[in-house]
Structure formats: structure tokens, C-alpha cells
Amino acid sequence: MLTEFGKIFVFILIAILFVVVALIAAKIIRPARPTHEKLLTYECGENPEGSPWVKFNIRFYVVALIFLIFDVEVVLLIPWALVYQDYGFTGFAVGAIFLLLLGLGMAYEWRKGDLEWDRPHPIPPVLKKSETDSNLKIPKEEIEVV
Amino acid sequence: MINLSEIFQILPLLIIGAGILLSLVLEMYSKQSEKVLPWISVFLFIIAGIYSLFSINETRMIVFHNMLSVGGNTHVFYFIFNIGAALVCLLSIDYIKKYGTYYGEYYILVQSSVLGMMLMAGAKDLLVIFMGLEIMSVSFYVLAGLNRKRLSANEASLKYFLLGAFATGFVVYGIALIYGSAQTTSLEVITAKFSALSTNLLFIVGVLLFLVGFSFKIAAFPFHMWVPDVYQGSPTTIAGLFSTGGKAAAFSSIIITLIAIFSNSAQNVFAPYLAVIATLSMLFGSIVAIAQDNIKRMLAYSSISHAGYLTIGLAAGNQDGVAGIIFYLAAYTFMNLGAFGIVAMIEGEAESNLTISSYAGLSSRKPLLAAMLALFMFSLAGIPPFAGFFGKYYVFIAAIKSDLTWLAIVGVFSSAISVYFYLRIVVLMYFKELSSELTLFESKTGLIAVIISSILVILLGIFPGSILQLITNFM
């Protein structure tokens, strides 16, 4: 006799079998004529350029952070949005409190400057007048030493 | 539907929850937050703690669709967490200046960790336990590494996070298997069906996984590897919170999940596991603490051995065991916070003055601090007039009543070993020459917190019977 979880287990088994059978069948049936072009990584029809393991800038985590907050918020709000009318004002208030909590967290991050896109601040090399002067004039003592 | 009257039954949780929001807004908009936040936290913790203490008797019910329990021992735990956290905040005010940069999140995270602890102690559903565990643990991971410029703090935070996440995985897997065998996550139903379930292999495996995860949180022997490094690296006051609040919360969760084994010890199929954990933790903690030179590491190993003594109560599996554990947790919270508080006051800048030898001759420099540290050390070692002795006594009595006399003997033996490293500090303070390099920082609030804990330790030692009676009444 199958329980509710038993059905899911059968479903998982069928899913695994489907993939395995399809791959094995393809392996048996297909002709194998590899060329250099075919073995390359598929990159939208273009020739691949460099390694895929490039370093991403750490600043992108801000994007991930914002995405996470709003994505989770939407996932949790959809079920509430579907049924809140049945619960009258209480239902509305519960959702409002939830939004308030999330909004407060968001405001905290904003206020603390954690959502700022942390731009690099390149300091262009400035040649000060005194420096250039001293660079041009080589002290006599050094010449004597050399 | 939500019944509005139910909301006011969980007032302690609401106070701390509102406190977190208030602190966040203050931290955002006020430049004075560094001065204001600690006092707001202390005030809220004391209000919540006192309210919990006085509402123990008023209402005992289960609210929010069998999710949270109100009154009784839940409120005893609320009291322990809140007063402990209030002491931690008092100690932190001056410590944090010495420790380095001030981070506004410090007190907010302490508050949210206490909220998590209270959810764990009040839960009537496995998922609420899990939610509380996560709120508490995530706050702890951040608190451990709050000073991100300090290498040891980073190490502590990373170790705690990786191992803690792994342990949480065990807890979730255990909950999944318990749900699979019992078809519910409600603890009421699981308790009612316990005798039938305790023959079910899936259920036993689930509970064992759950216990493995929580053995990590209580710092019991095979899962203790993180404890010394995390206590050493994190701020001393926060290490005090880990060892008291975190441990008490984890024990409260184990107790409410396995409440059925305490009413009928024949159902205690987990006794062998718990007895082994208890024995190994006690002996390992006591023996390894002897070799420690750093006082925070010594207190960490002492925390492991105290987890062992507390687990004896679980292994005993009777009503005396539960009462003993709760009494022991209250005593341990105050004596350990007092000890960590004095360590935090002696500690100098950049992790100096943490070796045991820096306590030499403290009695001539600071007689009050030395006397109180001696009191906490006597209490931790379990020497009679203080609270620690009665905690151990009740737990050992419970073990003897459940025919686990050998476990009580091992416990006494381990206490005898632990006397050596606790009293070594007392000997250093009173019978050794003054260490001249020690520069002491004044901390009035810290002194107040330590005095309060020593008073509580003495009170619990003088009136153990009536407090135990109080706990037993609300089982």
C-alpha cells in the first residue's frame, strides 16, 4: 500500500528512469562522429572566449541580496494575497505587519549604506610641484655616493 | 483565525520582538544609540524576565493552534534567558569599548537571539523549535564574529557557522523522520502516542538524529570540537551568552520534545545514548580543562563537562531529572555568567590578560572581584553552600532513583577532578605574588552585573528546596 510519500518516491523513481533510459537509448542509436567544433562548449553559436571560471566582482552580492529579499517576500505574499479577503481586517493586518517587518529591515540596510553600489575610487596619480622638483633635481650627495 | 486575546498571552515574546524593532529604528536614526541601546535592552530584558516570573502561575495554556505554550516551566526558562541576557548587556557596556569598534547590531542581535531562545523554550511544535533554533543560531554566528577586523573572531564565527549549520541539518533530518513516523509535528500528539512510537525504528532514528543535532548545541562530548575555539575567539560576554542561554535553550527543547520519557521511564529508550554522552562529556571536559592555560578555553572545557552533568538528568528520565536540569540550568547560568563577567572585566585590550597566570595576586588588587570569582569557582566546582552544588545534587539524585547509580558515581568522580582546575585560580588569586603587568579597567555596570549574579548564586544555594518546589509544581 502506498502512502502519500510512497507516491512521491515512485514519481522520483520514474523521473530517474526516464533520464537514464533516454540517455542510454540515445547512446545506442546515435552515430558518433565527433569533430573539434562539436566538442567545444556551446556558447550561443559563438566560439567560446576564455575560461568560464572568471572572478565576479564581489559588489554583485548587493544585487543578490536585494533579489533574495524581494523574491522571498513575493513567494510569501502570494498565498496571503489569494485568501486575505476571507479573513477581513485581521487578515489584512497580519500581512501588513509582515510587510512592515520586511520594510524595516530594508530601511535599515538602506540607511546603513549596505545597498550602495560600492564604486571603486581610483586616485589618479597627481604630480605635486615639490615632488617633480625634487625628482628633477638629483641631490648632489647621491651622485657623489654613486 | 487569530484570536486577539491569545496575542497578549505571549507578552514576553512581544516585548522582546517590539524591542528589536525599536532598537533597529533607534540604531538607524539616532547618533546616541551607542549610549541608549544597552539600557533599552537591559530594561526590556528585565521587564520580560520579571513579567515571566510573576505570570508563572496565572495562565497555563497552549495558544496559536497548538504552537506555543504559556505559563509554567516555559516561563521559568523565559526568566533564565532574560535575566541572563540583561546581565550580558550590563557587562557589555564597558567591555565593548575595550574590545574594539562599536557595532550597532550588537544589542539588537543579543535581543533577537533571546527571542529565538524563548521560542525554543515555549514551542509545542517541532517546526517552532526549529524556527527558534535558527533565530538563535544565526544571531550567535554573527555575534561570534562581530569584530570582523580581528582574526580570531573571524575564525570563531566561521567555525561556529559551518559546524552549526551541519548540526542544524541533523536536527532537520531528525524532524523529517519524526514527522514521517508520527505523521505530525505537534509535540502534544507525539507525546500522547509516545509509547507506541518508541518501538518504531524510524521514530527512534529520527529522535536520535534530533539529539545529535542538539548535542552540538549543548556542547556535549563527541560534538564539542567548536567550543574552545569559538569561546576563545568571540567577545567574552558573548561567550558567556553562548554557554548559558544557548545551552539552556537547547536543553529546554530536548525536554519539551522528550517530555514523555520523564513521565514513564520505561519509555526512555534513549537512556543508553544519553548516559554515554553524559559520561564522555563530564570526563573529557574535566580532564582536558586541567591542561588549559587560557581562562576562556578553561571555561569552555568546563562548559563541556557541565553539559555532561546536565545530560545525566535526561538519561535518568524521571520528574526529578527535569526539575534537577532546570534548577541546574538556572544555577549554571548565573554562576557561569558571573565567571565570564569577571574574565571580561580583567581582560585587557587585544586579548591580553587572558592567561590563568594573570590572575595571580588579584586579591590584593581587587579584593571584591577576587572574592566573587572565588565564589563562582566554588559554585562551578560544586562545593556545598552555593547553587552549583544543589544543581549537581538534584541531578545525581535523579540518576540514583532511575537505577543509574554508576552514572552518579562517574559524575561525582568528574566533579572531584574539576575541583583542581577551578580552585587553581582561587589559589593563584590568594596565595601568589601580585602580577605587576596587569592593568585593570574600571567597569561600574559590569561590577553591578557580577554582584547581581553572585547574589543569585547565593540565593539559589540558600533556598534550593523552595525553588525546586516551584519548578516541580509547574511541570
Image (tube, rainbow, N blue to C red):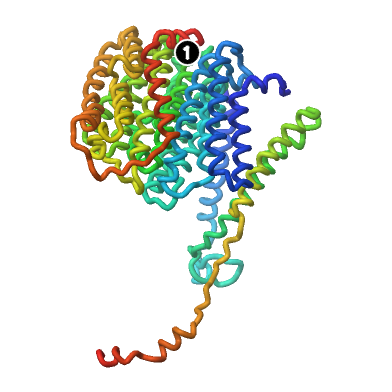
Please name the amino acid that badge 1 sits on. Answer: Ala
Q: Residue at x 48, y 43 (%)?
A: B142
Figure quadrant of the N terminus of chain B = top right
Task: Name the image quarter holding residue B207.
Answer: top left
Q: Residue at x 21, y 26 (%)?
A: B420
Q: Residue at x 44, y 11 (%)?
A: B467
Q: Position of residue B28 (x, y in %)?
A: 62, 46
Task: Name the image quarter holding residue B456.
Answer: top left
> Does residue B269 appear in this view?
no
Q: Position of residue A89 (x, y in %)?
A: 80, 29
Read off the chain for label 1. Answer: B
Give whichever of B200, A61 is nearer the camera: A61
Give whichever of B146, B431 is nearer the camera: B431
Estimate how packed mark 1 is, as few (under 14), some (14 to 19) or many (20 or more) residues with alpha carbons within 10 Å: many
Q: Residue at x 47, y 35 (%)?
A: B169
Q: Position of residue B10 (x, y in %)?
A: 62, 22
In the rendered structure, the answer to whether residue B283 lies left or right of residue B135 reads: left
- Which residue does the numbered mark 1 point to in the structure image? B260
Q: Position of residue B252 (x, y in %)?
A: 47, 22
> Does residue B168 appear in this view?
yes
In the rendered structure, the answer to whether residue B159 lies left or right of residue B298 reads: right
Q: Secondary structure at mark 1?
A: helix
